Image (spheres, helix red, strand yellow):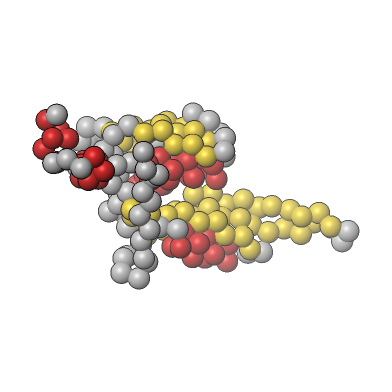
Amino acid sequence: MSTINIKRVKTSEIELKDRLVSIQRVAKVTKGGRTFSFSAIVVVGDENGIVGYGLGKAKEVTEAIAKGIDDAKKNLVKVPLLNGTVPHEQIGKFSGGFVLIKPAAVGTGVIAGGAMRAVLESAGVHNVLAKSKGSSNPHNVVKATVDALTKMRDAYTIAQQRGIDLNKVFNG
């Protein structure tokens, strides 16, 4: 079996929308007292199958968000979509984060928790059932969700990998 086919995307030709998933104030304790800074997790996507996430750290909130957006634009991946939902059921893992994503019928909406919802909506998924079963840490949930989405394969890709006709994938 071949490794996962992650399709990298260039940012120059697409219009991306960004979403702030989480922002946290962190403190470094030094001899002179506490030094506060901020870390922000940001998800960007074109709502048409392209999504990426990034982490930004800075002394101010706005700078942290701007750095997160820049980082997210460097990590874009293409996600296969099928009629506004995902092509098949998939599990994603990252560290303690464990997510389950299932396709849903038209009209279901995005049934997912906070960090997963941001990733799925940015990717352009309109109908999906999703469950986060491990860590609730937004870092791990976002990375596990992107992992699950990058593992997705559409029928055309499967036909190419197996070396068969597209009709044979569906009809046996």
**Vertically, is 78 above or below 112?**
below
Tell me where residue 157 appears, x and y as whole percent: 25, 45
Q: Depth check: give the residue in front, 159 or 118.
A: 159
Q: Depth check: give the residue in front, 4 or 67.
A: 4
- Residue at 53 percent across and 53 percent down: it is 41
Tell me where residue 56 appears, x and y as whole percent: 57, 59
Using the rendered view, name the quadrant where residue 105 is placed: top left
- Residue at 17 percent across and 35 percent down: it is 169
- Tally of numbered discs: 0
Q: Quadrant of the C terminus?
A: top left
Q: Is residue 162 left or right of residue 97?
A: left
Tell me where residue 39 appears, x and y as whole percent: 61, 55
Q: Quadrant of the N terminus?
A: top left
**Vertically, is 60 above or below 51?**
below
Tell me where residue 14 appears, x and y as whole percent: 31, 65
Q: Depth check: give the residue in front, 32 or 164.
A: 164
- Furthest toward the right, the residue is 31
- Residue at 37 percent across and 43 percent down: it is 2
- Residue at 45 percent across and 58 percent down: it is 75
Residue 132 visible, this orientation: yes
Residue 62 visible, this orientation: no
